[in-house]
Amino acid sequence: MALISADESETLPSAPRVLRGLAGETAYALVLTLLAAAATTLAVSGGSVWLAAAVLLAVSVAGIVQLAVPGLRPVQSLGHLAVPRTAAIAAVSLLLVQASPSSAGRWTAALTAGAVLGMMLLEPLLLRAVGARQAFAAHLPGVSPVPKLTNHAHTYVIGSFVLPGWGAATAALGWPVWLWSAATVAVLGIFGAAGLNAYRRARASRAIESNLGTALRQYAPDFIIYTARPDDASYQVAMWLPYLQRTGKKFIIVTRALVPAEALAELTDAPVVMRRRVADLDDVVVPSVNAVFYVNASSGNGAMVRFHELTHVYLGHGDSDKPPSYNPTHGMYDKIFAAGEAATRRYAEHGVSIPQDKFQIVGRPQLENVQPARPRGANAPVVLYAPTWRGHVEETFFHSLPVGEKIVRSLLDRGATVIFRPHPFSYEFPEDAAIIRNIQELLREDAESTGRKHLWGAEAESVRGIVECINASDAMVSDVSSVVSDYLYSGKPFAMVAVNSVAEDFVLQYPIARASYVLDGGLANVDQVLDSLLGSDEMARIRSDLRSYYLGDFPVEGYTDVFIEAARLVATTRASHTVPSAAADPEVQATPAEDVGAAGEEEAHLTSGRRRLLALLRFVLPALGAVITWCAHILVAPAWLTCAAGLATVAASLLFHRRALQRRRALNAMLGNDLAPRALLVLALLLQLGWPAWTGAAAWVTAGLFCWLAATTLEEQAATAWRPRGLDARNLPGVNTQGHEILPRGSVAVFSLVGLVAGFVTVFFGVGDAYIAAGVTALLLLAFTTKILGAGWWRSYRNLRHETELPQMVERLAPEFALYFGSNVGAGYQAGMWLPYLDRIGRPYIVITRTLRMMRAIAALTDAPVVHRPTLRSLEEVVPHSLKVAFYVNNAVKNTHFIERREMRHVWLNHGDSEKPACYNPVHAIYDHIFSAGQAGVDRYARHGVEIPAEKFRIVGRPQVEDIQRRHGAPRPNPTVLYAPTWRGPYADSAVYSLPSGRGIVQGLLDRGCTVIFRAHPFNYRFPEAAKWIAEIGELLAADSATTGRQHLFGKAAEQDMSVVDCFNASDAMVSDVSAMVSDYLQSGKPFSIVSVGRTIAELEAEAPASRAAYVIEEDLGNLDQALDNLLVHDPLAAQREESRVYYLGDFPAGSYADGFLTTARELIDAPRRPL
């Protein structure tokens, strides 16, 4: 089972609770903002200094309390309550100017305020620096670790709340302004320390990235221990470390996230390296590495399995009869080390097909120190109670903790001493954590009253390991858990709680229960079971018989050596299927959102400096402009100067958002941007219009001040309210999860900026009575912002309610199959190519996506229900009893989350058929069926050393080619040739596309009088160099059209207005490279050429058999003329193409070609659902 972090498995809070939380946060921020506005009004209207100071002190105290109290502390301090903090500092500067009106006092207050405000307005930059993802390497010779992240940022934010209160006290008590300046310097120092720590971390991280490859090659590890879990599950690695170390081979530990890397670095002296992105894994697969050991079935494991030249060994982290121990994803590994025969048979018994030669029985070395049962004697028994955790899906809900208190009480009533060791993951669930505390309190009270030496808490969970707890006990009570099979080694009696099952069925479902005393899930038979467990123990013989079945038939002496020798052999031996790795697999690369191929990074360096500068200016210019505007106001600069600074600041902000102003969705991203600078500009503008007062015409200024600042604060809360919550779906009958907006919500930010422009222009030109217009504008802005906020709240509330109703909605739809889309890219072509054929199956279905962007993209392509499921647990809501089949179109890592549903059949479709690694990825072994266009797709796996049972394959054709027209008659004298190069791939060493030679190829075609259709791969536009080549070819074709009148097609005409099939049908021949275009083009019967890039012609034929039917063009174009003669004139390979067509696309009649897929799909869908 794919193991994930808590946030991946957590359930959603209730709608009322979320709404109360949003309303509470909004009220808190709004009150602080209004208090700061009141202090500003008091400071400039001649009100009581003491009252203004008291108000500001209240703002300070409220902010400090929230940041200092753990239960109230926000997740991220930087940027928290930025608007009220900015307004409070502005009010303090005004108050200090009133208290110290001298020129020196005014300048000191202005400069200090400028420093504080500049620091606060630049918090987004510090946040990006502090939160930047860093590299990690520990204990690796030649590589220095990244310094620890300090807590300076949080301390600084507390300090920024201290400053308004200190400044207010300084003004009220008549102290010199420099005291406030001194406090500001101290806070600035903390800010600087946070920035310096971030800089040092970034520098060390860059050094790691630069030196890691060299250091690993010098270290020369023999194998890798790999974990892709994002959370701290270090025990899964720790349980194997002593035994892998005893192989005597060098190794490294590779993680994909920082939390487990740091935890493991504390546990071992072995090198620990974090490689967050898929592209980064290339660095750790150095020539010395022979094998990779996997300690869990994390969904990120497929990213490492793609390295075919290594032997991939699944270890797991426990052996039980639970679904994680027969997870179909284990089929992707080369070897599965099993404790005993039970583990090897478990898969087939649950319908998981894995070749038997992948299994190797090695025992369970962690049990070497488990002591055998001993005569109990007259002392009261010691009983270990070790409940498992609840799991993150319903299928793994086996934990007995809900009845744990009754179990422990029953043991205590019999005078037993109890060792209570709950699973550590149980603490992540509040209700389970509460039960654990109750049991611990029960044991504490009993220990005090009876003197029995119960063990619980740290003594049982961390001070002692599980083996020590087993040795200290005379018997055990547990549930369906790996602890049970481990306990079997001791020979001691144990009981299992039959959670959600009757005892008879429980024993059939979980064979190890044959050696157990089975407790009814409701504990109705607890007395009878405990009497046997702690008394007669009639199960002793059965336990002895099952021990070797579950834990291997090896002698006690040397038991651990079996595993060590097996691991040593794998770590010493290079895999026999040494073929090019799947490094170029774009699906593996594309699935993690943050992953960018090394090739993309290489070219990004050409523009990275400019991008970094623009990103810096994006934050700095609005902040700097707002500070200058405010300081100009405090220093009583000419109105035109203050207004000019304000207008320049607004202009800079609009400039950086100019693209957002052109598109609705991009405009929405403006909501909540640059709020603190805007708040400062609002204060400067309104105070330029006039002095606020509580009565008279000046009350309009006061109203404007309060309303505009309130609107700015509410805008921040609106941005929070509009974040996705609850259900997001399209095409569900009677359900609309989108928010209703007459105007885009981001337009509230534009309205505010336009209002500032109008206000500053008015002041600049000295228009009188503008304060009334300003007040009205502020009122309208507040009303608009409140409406946006309310709409966001309502959307969150409604969608959370819809989320609770989703299972019933899906049950009513009764879908019989699903299209599962786990990737975050490619919906248009990957899902789009299959949706028409899924519709033609004629059965109701749903589309399940894992990202919102893909949900929206696919919803635009189909009328079928499309449901976004962000977490693994949320997938439970879209698996009704009617759902029998799931189809997969890409290699997304999150596919493993849905494959766990063993009651369904899981079918791999792919989104193209080619010789690229994506089409023979060993991960495909996890699916129940693999739909292949022809026999070529079946043979491709074996040719690359990927072992998949033959019964998993179904040859169904490739329905997308049904509309490709076959060639009739001889070629035309001036043929139309399609040039369709593939994309460069995600990595520099996978750039085996022909586009670099494209201009020469196209020129050769033009010289022969051809009309050219040039269809560039859309992904190539991501790379500046590739985009330049595309443009050059376009210019060449445009110039030729102008000269000859030939109607070449390129750019939008060939890539958007025409489909791939349209391009095929419009052409007489094609030039391409190793891509799915080649096998699809075979259906036309027309001649084609393949450009052999990075390979000899012999290597190309071995890798891509379709090339035997192609006129191969060498990479340097040395044989271009000869190849084009054969392509356009002689065509000697026509018969070979027909054989290749059948081999690649199946032998289906042209008139009903798609029926091969449709019929096979219907057969699977109409078959009965698998029994669980």
Image: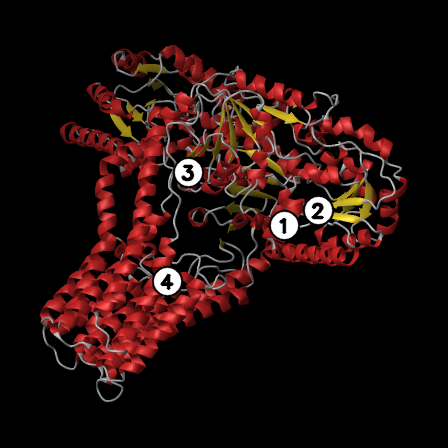
The residue tagged 3 is: 829
| Residue 628 location, quadrant | bottom left
The residue tagged 1 is: 426
Residue sitting nearer the eye, 767 or 379: 379
Quarter holding the N terminus?
Answer: top right
Mark 3–mark 2 Cα distance, whole angstroms, equals 47 Å
The residue tagged 4 is: 158
Give the mark, 4 or 1, whose residue is nearer the N terminus. Answer: 4
| Residue 201 location, quadrant | top left
- Quick check: 919 above or below 93? above
Find numbered disc 3 in the image and state the secondary structure of the residue it sits on.
helix
The residue sitting at 42% across, 22% down in the picture is: 219
The residue tagged 2 is: 387
Give the mark, 4 or 3, whose residue is nearer the N terminus. Answer: 4
Residue sitting nearer the eye, 666 or 833: 666
Mark 2–mark 1 Cα distance, whole angstroms, equals 9 Å
Mark 2–mark 4 Cα distance, whole angstroms, equals 43 Å
Give the mark, 3 or 2, whose residue is nearer the N terminus. Answer: 2
Q: Position of residue 9 (x, y in %)?
A: 56, 49
- Which of pointers 3 and 1 indicates the residue nearer the eye? 1
Amino acid type at circle 1 is Ser
